[in-house]
Amino acid sequence: MSVRNGLLALLTTGPRHGYELKKELEERTGSLWELNVGQVYTTLSRLERDGLVTEDDAAGHGGVVDDAPKGAGQDQRQYSLTDAGRAEVGEWFAAPRLRSAPDRDELVIKLTIAASLDGQRSIDGGRIDLDEIIDAQRAATTEALQTYTRLKARADGDDLARLFALDAVIAQIDGELRWLDQCQQRRDALRSTRRPSTGSSRPARRPHR
Amino acid sequence: MSVRNGLLALLTTGPRHGYELKKELEERTGSLWELNVGQVYTTLSRLERDGLVTEDDAAGHGGVVDDAPKGAGQDQRQYSLTDAGRAEVGEWFAAPRLRSAPDRDELVIKLTIAASLDGQRSIDGGRIDLDEIIDAQRAATTEALQTYTRLKARADGDDLARLFALDAVIAQIDGELRWLDQCQQRRDALRSTRRPSTGSSRPARRPHR
DNA sequence: CGACACATGTAACACGTTACATGATTTG
DNA sequence: CAAATCATGTAACGTGTTACATGTGTCG
């Protein structure tokens, strides 16, 4: 629903056409992800179907206020919010995101299943090794953290949207890293409880930071 | 892809039928989310279509090894991994989750857009108030944190999957809370820079914890 | 007998993604 | 003139969600 609600929210400030909406949604959410233009049009037509937006066909030549975007001039279909649409946006902004049933997180699924299958001879001759999975993920996550930390260092201090978005991504990545360490620790703890000195290959964990 | 990959991963330990897979996937990922049985069957048929699993029709009566589940006895279709399927699982476990293009997060979209629309008279007479949105979300998030913290306190210390899952959810929620505070601070900072003493209604932020 | 867990599936739909097709206008 | 940007859309497909239909076996 992100795209859908995002588009609706943008339209509260006035009608726009598809291409503009794409650009604006990307920029106003921090320019961290790209939106396929095609999806804007599909989503808009679904919104129209649901009575949340209307399409005011204003052909480029002729009338129109003409503070129109520079490079325009042909089809130019404007979309506006209906009252129902305005109501939906209001509700969206007013209602917090709930976590009654938490989202499925693919990484959590991977690690929990790996934990319960750990050591089993199952993947064509190989074994599922929880430690390896965690280590590989930690490497990738650490790299991502660096990437976004760098982006944040370079960010324009007045672009609130971008700062918010970068903070969020970094917080998520950082949380993931902590979580990975936590999993490792739990695991080691359990292992040492059960088989007190299997003093094998596992090196001591360096906590990050 | 969570369900799809989860099912594939479970099948590495041997053939199972649909209903079993549903139960097992729920339990082995910490029993924090529910999976609609219907989806298991649709997903399995898609996996079959893609040549990743095969369906060995083993009617309940007659042969079969008969360590079969107690309450069974009728249709009982077993699904097994093909070689292609086994390969996919291997790749899934081996490859870390990438964050090259970060996922769209609806809450981030909501707050970034709200930040850029803040104060505008736009929602049928009302205004979009970033502070209100943040406060409402913080309340909901705080409640969620309590819920899952309680669950964790009661959790069985030997159920690694459940502990992993609870840790992950809590880490996410905690991160969200910190992020909300961070947004608030950034905002207050920016506001005081621009209009030095608008000493209006906003009370001082209590940092959480 | 009735409720519940076991067991299987289909149909319809939601949102999101990619690839494709088309064309005007601006700029180097 | 060529390439980039502006601009609009469709077709086909992917996963996930809900609601519905159907039936057996067990237990109180």
Image (cartoon, coloured by chain):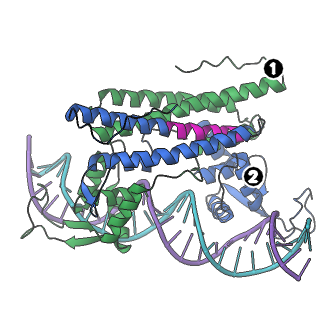
Chain colours: A blue, B green, C cyan, D purple
Which chain letter matches label 2?
A
Question: Is label 1 in a helix, a strand or a loop?
Answer: loop
Q: In which quarter of the image is the N terminus of chain B?
A: bottom left
Q: Which stretch is magenta? A: A161-175
| Crowdedness near tag 2: few (<14), some (14–19) or many (≥20) residues, C-alpha within 10 Å | some
Which residue shows up at 37% across the image and 34% down it? A204
Which quadrant of the view contains residue A46?
bottom right
Q: Is B195 placed left or right of A167 in the picture?
A: right
Residue B2 position within the rendered picture, expressed as x and y whole percent measured from the top left = 41, 55
Which residue is pictured at 85% across the width and 68% down the height?
Answer: A59
Instruction: Residue A124: give its label.
Output: none
Q: Which of A123 and C4 lies nearest the eye of the viewer? A: A123
Main SS category, magenta section: helix
Task: Name the amino acid, label 1.
Answer: Thr
Amino acid beneath label 2: Glu
Does B97 sit above or below residue D28?
below
- Asked if residue B17 shows in the view, the reply is yes
Q: Is residue B37 above or below residue B125?
A: below
Residue closest to the eye, D6 or A116: A116
Let me know if residue B158 appears in the view.
no
- Judge left or right: residue B112 versus residue B79: right
A16 left or right, relative to A209: right
Q: Describe the element under mark 2 as helix, strand or loop.
A: helix
> Which mark is drawn over residue A24?
2
Chain designation of label 1: B
Q: Residue shown at 72%/57% (left/top)?
A: A22
Determine which residue is flagged by label 1: B198
Q: Where is residue B161 in the image (x, y as percent from the top left)?
A: 31, 41
Q: Does the magenta stretch include residue A106?
A: no
Q: Where is residue B79 in the image (x, y as percent from the top left)?
A: 25, 66
| Neighbour tally class for label 1: few under 14, some 14-19, many 20 plus, Cα within 10 Å | few
